């Protein structure tokens, strides 16, 4: 009995590049990538509330091209966050959320940064209160001028 090979669609793309594009007329950001099997280029666009590809497998819930775009975006966010401070990271997360509608990860990240900033400010205030406690090391007396001065 001979074994027969069944053709299975790969779940990851083999192409080295995913291109980020901007439509000059509408300023829409979308991604393109070349097909693994032919010279066809596929576009992944944000439609409604999710990424959608124009490949033949678009009837599936999420195709490999959409997953590749999500991976690229995750790496992009990680690289940006690693190189900037908290305030700038919050600004970048806001800009990414604006340029890519429905980007829940950026909104969640932005909320986390805001919470961390509030906690840092609270710690800073607590530290200031502890440092600013006046503990006199000398006994004080009133001078003839009426001023409060250390005792001799």
Image: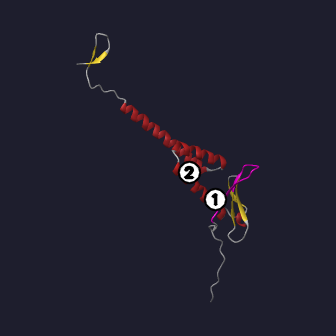
Q: 32 and 125: which one is in front?
A: 32
Magenta highlight on residue 22:
yes
- Expressed as whole percent of the image width and height from the top left, the position of residue 135 reads 30, 27
- Residue 130 found in image quarter: top left
- At x 37%, y 29%, the residue is 132
- Residue 34 found in image quarter: bottom right
Q: Are the residues flagged by discs 2 and 1 in contact, CB closer than 8 Å?
A: no
Residue farthest bottom in this picture: 1
Q: Which mark is residue 56?
A: none
Q: Is residue 33 visible?
A: yes
| Residue matched to label 1 | 69
- Expressed as whole percent of the image width and height from the top left, the position of residue 150 reads 27, 19
Image quarter of the N terminus: bottom right
Crowding around mark 1 (Cα neighbors within 10 Å: few <14, some 14 to 19, many 20+) is many
Q: Tell which circle, 2 or 1, labels the residue nearer the N-terminal end.
A: 1
- Expressed as whole percent of the image width and height from the top left, the position of residue 38 reads 72, 71
| Residue matched to label 2 | 80
In the image, is residue 74 above or below residue 64? above
Magenta highlight on residue 113:
no
Residue farthest top in this picture: 144
- Expressed as whole percent of the image width and height from the top left, the position of residue 76 reads 58, 54
In the image, is residue 86 above or below residue 132? below
Residue farthest right in this picture: 25
Image quarter of the C terminus: top left
Query: How many numbered marks does the figure carry?
Result: 2
**Span highlighted in magenta in the image:** 16-30
Q: Is residue 101 visible?
A: no
- At x 64%, y 67%, the residue is 15
Q: Is residue 31 left or right of residue 132?
A: right
What colour scheme was applied to this rendering of the protein? secondary structure
Q: Is residue 28 left or right of residue 135?
A: right
């Amino acid at each position: 009995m001979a074994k027969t090979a069944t053709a299975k669609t790969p779940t990851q793309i083999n192409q080295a590049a995913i291109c980020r594009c901007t439509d000059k007329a509408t300023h829409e950001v979308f991604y393109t990538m070349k097909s693994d099997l032919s010279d066809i280029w596929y576009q992944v666009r944000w439609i409604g509330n999710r990424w959608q590809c124009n490949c033949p497998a678009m009837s599936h819930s999420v195709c490999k091209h959409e997953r590749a775009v999500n991976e690229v975006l995750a790496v992009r966010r990680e690289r940006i966050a690693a190189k900037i401070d908290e305030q700038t990271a919050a600004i970048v997360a806001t800009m990414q959320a604006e340029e890519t509608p429905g980007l829940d990860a950026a909104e969640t990240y932005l909320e986390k940064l805001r919470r961390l900033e509030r906690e840092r400010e609270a710690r800073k205030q607590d530290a200031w209160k502890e440092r600013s406690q006046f503990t006199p090391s000398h006994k004080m007396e009133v001078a003839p001028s009426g001023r409060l001065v250390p005792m001799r």
